[in-house]
């Protein structure tokens, strides 16, 4: 009679009962027989080590995957800008520029000059609104402009519908059918800094260049928080 059947009378498959009876040869599943303090401590150490190693490995894999997607996106944007002779103007950083604050720090500019790109679901499709870094969407203005409530896309929807991942969304080299709108909050600046497809990139553009390179559909006025007090 096989050894594992003598230890586990029910005679099930070797895998689960063997572990239950402490017979596994893998150190992760080897339980201390009598339970001395040293054995228990060693057992818990093995569990913690394996657990933390797994978490660290998973984080590295996720980070590499995200970086890989960013590299593909920025190369797509770089190729797009080459058609305008402006690819060399793209700036890449050793630090993240995924948020307005981080981008402003990386560039050494005022946060409001960051041209952030917001993604919305409008009439079953994607609409991008490029706005100043200090501007916030004004729901009544948005509804008056697009005849629907402002509903932002989920991160998964953004990448699928726009072609860029969150943190690197920009109005350049986007998927076909995406509508692009420039918000009035940008007009007060001579130059602004939109992203270039990755979470560590940007390009400085004049407003006329932004119009040209984004191939925008229209100017809109759907944001608040950037006007001087008393202005409409």
Image (tube, helix red, strand yellow):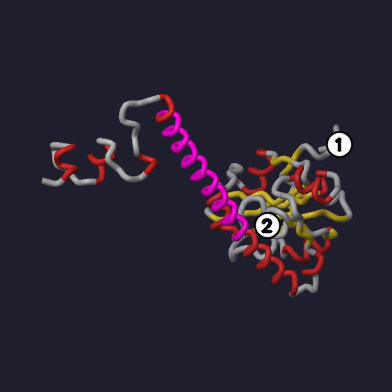
Give, as a single range, the part of the protein colored magenta.
40-68
The residue closer to the viewer here, 76 or 140, is: 76
Judging by the rendered image, the residue that carries numbered circle 1 is 228
- Identity of the residue drawn at 31% across and 30% down: 33
Q: Quadrant of residue 134?
A: top right
Quarter of the figure that contains the C terminus = top right
Instruction: State the mark number for residue 214.
Output: none
In reply to whether residue 91 is colored magenta, the answer given is: no
- Identity of the residue drawn at 34% across and 38% down: 30
Q: Quadrant of residue 225?
A: top right
Give the percent coordinates (x, y) of residue 214. 73, 63
Q: How much space separates mark 2 and mark 1, taking CA atoms?
A: 32 Å
- Identity of the residue drawn at 66% across and 39% down: 139
The residue closer to the viewer here, 231 or 96, is: 96
Query: Relative to residue 161, is residue 140 depicted above or below?
Result: above
How would you rate the neighbour count of disc 2 (Cα within 10 Å): few for under 14, some for 14-19, many for 20 or more?
many
């Amino acid at each position: 009679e096989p050894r594992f059947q003598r230890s586990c009378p029910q005679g099930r498959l070797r895998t689960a009962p063997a572990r239950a009876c402490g017979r596994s040869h893998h150190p992760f599943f080897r339980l201390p027989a009598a339970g001395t303090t040293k054995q228990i401590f060693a057992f818990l150490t093995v569990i913690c080590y394996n657990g933390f190693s797994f978490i660290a490995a998973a984080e590295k894999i996720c980070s590499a995957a995200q970086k890989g997607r960013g590299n593909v996106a920025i190369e797509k944007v770089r190729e797009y800008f080459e058609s305008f002779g402006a690819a060399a103007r793209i700036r890449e950083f050793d630090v993240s520029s995924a948020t307005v604050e981080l981008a402003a720090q990386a560039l050494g500019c005022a946060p409001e000059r960051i041209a952030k790109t917001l993604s919305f679901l409008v009439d079953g499709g994607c609409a991008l609104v490029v706005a100043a870094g200090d501007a916030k969407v004004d729901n009544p203005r948005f509804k008056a402009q697009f005849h629907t409530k402002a509903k932002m896309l989920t991160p998964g929807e953004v990448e699928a519908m726009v072609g860029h991942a969150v943190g690197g969304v920009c109005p350049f080299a986007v998927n076909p059918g995406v509508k692009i709108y420039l918000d009035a909050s940008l007009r007060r600046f001579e130059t602004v800094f939109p992203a270039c497809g990755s979470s560590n990139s940007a390009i400085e553009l004049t407003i006329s260049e932004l119009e040209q390179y984004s191939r925008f559909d229209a100017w809109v006025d759907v944001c608040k928080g950037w006007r001087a007090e008393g202005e409409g």
